[in-house]
Image (cartoon, helix red, strand yellow):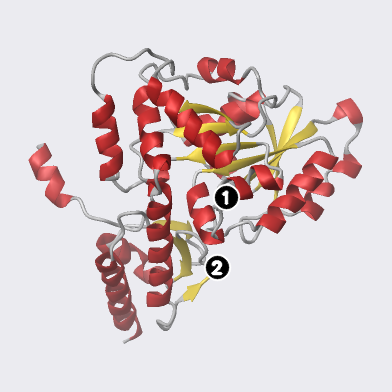
Amino acid sequence: MEIDQIIPALRNGLGSDNHAGVHPEILQAVIAANVGHAHSYGDDPFTERAEALIRRHFGNEAVSYFVFNGTGANVTALAAITSPYDAVICAETSHLNIDECGAPERLGGLKLLTLPTVNGKIYPDQILSFFPSRRGEHQVRPRVISITQSTEMGTVYTQQELSALSEVAHENNLYLHVDGARFSNAAVCLDADFKSISKDVGVDVISFGGTKNGLLFGEAVIFLSSEAAPDYKFYRKQNMQLASKMRFISAQFCALLEGNLWQRNAEHANSMAKVLANRIKSIPGIRITQKTEANAVFVRVPVQVISELKEACFFYDWNIDLGEIRLMTSFDTTLEDIDLFGDVLEQKLKILNE
């Protein structure tokens, strides 16, 4: 199939914010950076500017490194602050545990200690349960608490919850890591700036997402203390996350953070999720299963209609046995996309119930 045949066949869905295209302002930033020669591996003015913008948003001590993708950000960040006998405490539903193909274990050498969760969050009392049973060198040493913000279930940790987690982490000589693939969505939900939900509440390191918020590709690993991981650059290189032409990642972060593009994109995605939840919540036979706080809607529908619904508007199953599906909105989700899904859902349920 030729390109001119593919393009008309593409349409928006509710599968993932990873499915969305690239925001035009991001594309323009990449084009603008594509002039002349610039030194490689981050020794360029675009990277220098992007690092300064991250310090503006996350605090003057923030040290940032750009990488290709979220798995690479998580694995290299965690490897840099752990030893081979260390473990990472995380939710059983975390991307780290479910969707990284064992990379934390194989490439990072990390043991994951998972905790059950019903809403994607983990709590201090769960974490403390690990410590009475530790028997010195006979067992791995918990070294990091890793949480996702916003969570894989679309929920958002409050500042108070983050502070409580950092307190239990630091009292037990642990780091607090945040998988922030959708950190911008969380900040918008909380009506907060980045620093107030990271540095100010005791977070040590963030995998800060760009791809899910309008970038072509690229994430940033941000250490909120300049002393946190002085050797990180070696982990990044060894794990194949060091970009040669880094200016094309950095230029995107400049566009995202220079003004309020990060906020505009996340606000739109979050607001569309609320519109979607309101559109479908009153339909008989439908039950929303999680709070709609960021840009995800989790909903149970009759299993019999799932396949036909996907043909009209793609989404992912979450728990197929329960008929639970995940609907994701993004910076380019439209009211027409939501109406289409709602209309088709009502039609399919009407036919099912006749």
Q: Do labels 2 and 1 touch, CB within 8 Å?
A: no
Q: Residue at x 45, y 59 (%)?
A: 295
Q: Residue at x 45, y 24 (%)?
A: 48
Q: Residue at x 34, y 26 (%)?
A: 248
Task: Please give left or right for residue 107 compared with residue 83 in the image.
Answer: left
Disc assigned to residue 291:
2
Task: Please give left or right for residue 4 compared with residue 323 in the image.
Answer: left
Q: Quadrant of residue 46?
A: top left
Task: Find the residue positioned furthest to the bottom.
Answer: 354
Say which residue label 1 marks.
149
Where is residue 228? Give x, y as percent.
Answer: 69, 27
Is residue 105 visible in the rendered image? The answer is yes
Disc assigned to residue 220:
none
- The front one of 44 and 189 is 44
Q: What's the amino acid at mark 2?
A: Lys
Where is residue 174? Give x, y as percent.
Answer: 77, 36
- Could you tell me which quadrant the C terminus lies in? bottom left
Q: What's the amino acid at mark 1?
A: Gln
- Sequence order check, earlier mark of 2 and 1: 1
With respect to residue 152, does 204 lie above or below?
above
> Label 2 to label 1, Cα distance in Å?
14 Å
